[in-house]
Image: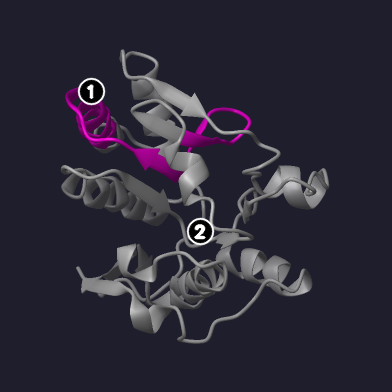
């Protein structure tokens, strides 16, 4: 999911997937046509967008397995087979302090759907600088849902890959642990991981919401 301001970063993610041989027809990209500006982490605007993100996820948790991919991700290989091979209602990136809602696989089921529903309610009922990840981790602790945590060497976050330099086994990188989109874009550019051409974006499913 993206807004206009984050569209170049979505294109960068999609181009990395295209280069790695992902089946691009399986991507479903949701574009928030009403949001023109980038939201900064830990703001009410960011909270609002991440609530919408959970709502989009819930709507798409049907009969098929779903892999959610945030925009600030670059793939190094087609890791779909590896992720699908893991057990659990959720297969999630390890963000250090908890499960990462920026990169995870969800299998349809009563418990999995209820976790997302409860996460939306949790977020809407609270004030302050909170987001979908806070909500999911709080709700999951109270749920019997099964969750598999991915290796942070193979599926590293921004801190692990860029700061701790644990890179040799990485299948992708999630450029989080930065506050703004501009910082994330610059970090990708500094490491030769930037391509905002339309190649990948032109061959995926797109929905304006």
Residue carrying label 2: 40
Q: Looking at the image, which is closer to me, 86 or 200?
A: 86
State the residue at coordinates (72%, 66%). Answer: 187
Residue 197 visible somewhere in the drawing: yes
| 94 w.r.t. 49: above or below | above
Q: Residue 62 lies in magenta, yes or no?
A: no
Q: CA distance from mark 2 to mark 1?
A: 31 Å
| 53 w.r.t. 72: above or below | above
State the residue at coordinates (51%, 59%). Answer: 40
Point out residue 89 in the picture as x, y percentages from the top left corner: 33, 28
Residue 1 placement, left or right of 74: left
State the residue at coordinates (48%, 76%). Answer: 11
Q: Which mark is residue 111?
A: 1
Badge 1 crowding class, 10 Å Cα cut-off, few under 14, some 14 to 19, many 20 or more, is some
Point out residue 56 in the picture as x, y percentages from the top left corner: 23, 52
Q: Looking at the image, which is closer to me, 190 or 16?
A: 16
């Amino acid at each position: 999911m993206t807004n206009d301001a984050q569209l170049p970063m979505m294109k960068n993610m999609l181009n990395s997937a295209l280069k790695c041989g992902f089946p691009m027809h399986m991507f479903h990209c949701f574009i928030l046509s009403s949001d023109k500006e980038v939201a900064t982490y830990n703001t009410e605007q960011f909270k609002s967008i991440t609530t919408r993100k959970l709502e989009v996820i819930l709507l798409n948790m049907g009969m098929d397995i779903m892999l959610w991919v945030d925009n600030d991700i670059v793939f190094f290989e087609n890791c779909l087979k590896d992720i699908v091979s893991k057990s659990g209602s959720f297969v999630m990136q390890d963000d250090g302090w908890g499960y990462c809602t920026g990169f995870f696989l969800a299998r349809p089921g009563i418990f999995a759907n209820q976790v997302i529903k409860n996460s939306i309610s949790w977020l809407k009922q609270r004030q302050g600088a909170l987001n979908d990840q806070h909500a999911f981790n709080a709700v999951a602790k109270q749920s019997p849902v099964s969750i598999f945590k991915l290796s942070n060497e193979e599926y590293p976050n921004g801190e692990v890959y860029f700061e701790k330099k644990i890179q040799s086994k990485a299948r992708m990188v999630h450029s989080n642990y930065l506050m703004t989109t501009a910082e994330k874009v610059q970090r990708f550019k500094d490491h030769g991981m930037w391509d905002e051409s339309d190649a990948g974006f032109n061959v995926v499913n797109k929905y304006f919401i």
